[in-house]
Image: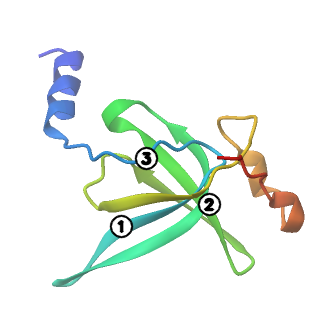
Amino acid sequence: MGKNAILQYVEDQVERKEFPEFKAGDTITVKYKIKEGEKERIQSFKGVVIQRRGDKKVETFTVRKMSGNVGVERIFPVASPFIDSIEINKRGIVRRARIFYLRKLTGKKARIKERKR
C-alpha cells in the first residue's frame, strides 16, 4: 500500500459533519463534548478564528479568546467527533488568511471590523 492509498483509507473512515462556512476573522462559538468519568457534557468556546489549515479530513482551525487578561487559543480538528456544533456570531473583515498579529494587540486595537451581511 502506498502513502496515498493509506491516506485515502483514513479519509474514507472519518465521518465529517457539515458546519457553516467560516474563515479567519470570524467570531464563532464551538460547542464540543467533554467526557468527565462516565458523564458527558457540552462546553462552548467562543472566540475569533485566527487560522484554518490543512485540507479535507485533516483540516484544523484555531480559535483565540481572551480569558481575563490572558489569551487562550485552542486548535480544533474539523473532523473531530467531539465537536457538536459551530455557530457564527460575527463575520469579520481581515486581509490575511492567518491573523497571528492579533496575538500582540490588546484592547481596542484587537477589534475586527464586522462584515455586513
How packed is label 2: few (under 14 Cα within 10 Å), some, or many (20 or more)?
many
Discs 2, 3 touching: Cβ within 8 Å = no
Report the number of numbered marks.
Answer: 3
Query: Which is more toward the observer, 4 or 34?
Result: 34
Q: 83 left or right of 37?
A: right
Disc 3 versus disc 1: distance between alpha carbons?
15 Å
Residue 73 place in picture, x, y as percent:
58, 61
Q: Residues within 10 Å of mark 1 (few under 14, many from 20)?
A: some
Q: Name the residue beneath numbered marker 2.
A: 64
Instruction: Determine which quarter of the picture holds residue 6.
Output: top left
What residue do we see at 60% from left, 63% from top? 47
Q: Is residue 54 above or below residue 42?
A: above
Counting from the top left corner in percent of width and height, residue 38 is at 15, 84
Left or right: 91 in relation to 34: right
Residue drawn at x 43%, y 54% is 76
Label 2: state its secondary structure: strand
According to the picture, the residue beneath numbered tag 3 turns out to be: 20
Q: Amino acid at mark 1?
A: Tyr
Label 3 or label 1, whichever comes before in sequence order: 3
Residues 116 and 7: in front is 116
Q: What amino acid is labelled 2 in the image?
A: Arg
Q: Earlier in the sequence, mark 2 or mark 1?
A: 1
The amino acid type of the residue labelled 3 equals Pro
Q: How many angstroms separate mark 2 from mark 1 (CA)?
A: 15 Å
- Classify residue 114 as left or right of residue 47: right
Which one is closest to the eye, mark 3 or mark 1? 3
Quarter of the figure that contains the N terminus? top left
Which residue in the protein does label 1 denote? Answer: 32
User: Within the image, what quadrant is residue 9 found in?
Assistant: top left
- The residue that appears at 19% across and 41% down in the rendered structure is 14
Q: Secondary structure at mark 1?
A: strand
Residue 37 higher or lower than 76, as above or below = below
